[in-house]
Image (cartoon, rainbow, N blue to C red):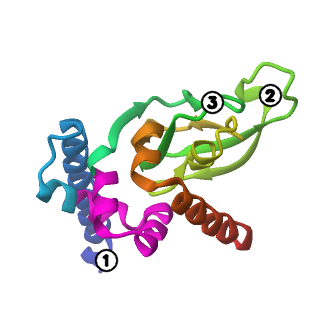
Amino acid sequence: MNNPEKFLVPFVIHNFYKNYLKEMKRILEKGIGKRSDSDIRFLSTYLKYNDFFFNLAKMKDKSTLNQCYRHISLEFHKKSQFIFHFGQKGDKFYVLLKGEVQLLLPKDSTKELTSENMIDIKNLGVGSSFGELALFSNKPRTASILAIEDCDLAVLKKRDFRKILCIEKFLEICENLLIRGVRR
């Protein structure tokens, strides 16, 4: 006889995450300055596992993290839509809440930046973050990001990002992320 738990567990997990995401989106849609302490705690339970926020938590106090959570907004990108292009000015940091994206580099930077003229480096899934390099360096984006599924993203804008994080600490965090990325 088949084990009903084998089928029930994925269903329960899927529904739990679906409800969790729905609540997270509801909180992010409230906007900056309208979130309660309870909302911030809820966001923290998810975002604290993201590499960037995990490293930030090691270096900064809880109030700094809470300020980041208070300033995060929600963006939606449809499947096949570029979130940003190689060479663009960076103005946002992203955490993928739902969906999947592709990290792409141009085959030839003199040609038009379309998915056909790009090399697929890797796919990023739920919980991944991207965009922080352009925010601390003031250099153009070093890659393109393409939504390969409909995506919900938590977004922290550059001006808020820099104001909250004090750039020296941010450079330290990025250095730690880069070192860990090289080891992977």
The residue closer to the viewer here, 98 or 179, is 179
Q: Which residue is mark 2?
A: 117
| Tally of marks | 3
- Residue at 39%, 51% (x, y): give it: 164
Q: Position of residue 57 (x, y in %)?
A: 40, 70
Q: On the rendered image, what quadrant is the N terminus found in?
A: bottom left
Q: Earlier in the sequence, mark 1 or mark 2?
A: 1
Q: Which residue is mark 3?
A: 89
- Mark 2 Cα shell of 10 Å, populated few (<14), some (14-19), many (≥20): some
In which quadrant of the rendered view does residue 9 lie? Answer: bottom left
Q: Position of residue 177 (x, y in %)?
A: 61, 65
Q: Nearer the viewer, mark 3 or mark 1?
A: 3
* Residue 51 located within the stretch drawn in magenta: yes
Q: Which residues are magenta?
A: 42-69
Say if residue 43 shows up in the picture.
yes
Q: What secondary structure characterizes most of the magenta part?
A: helix
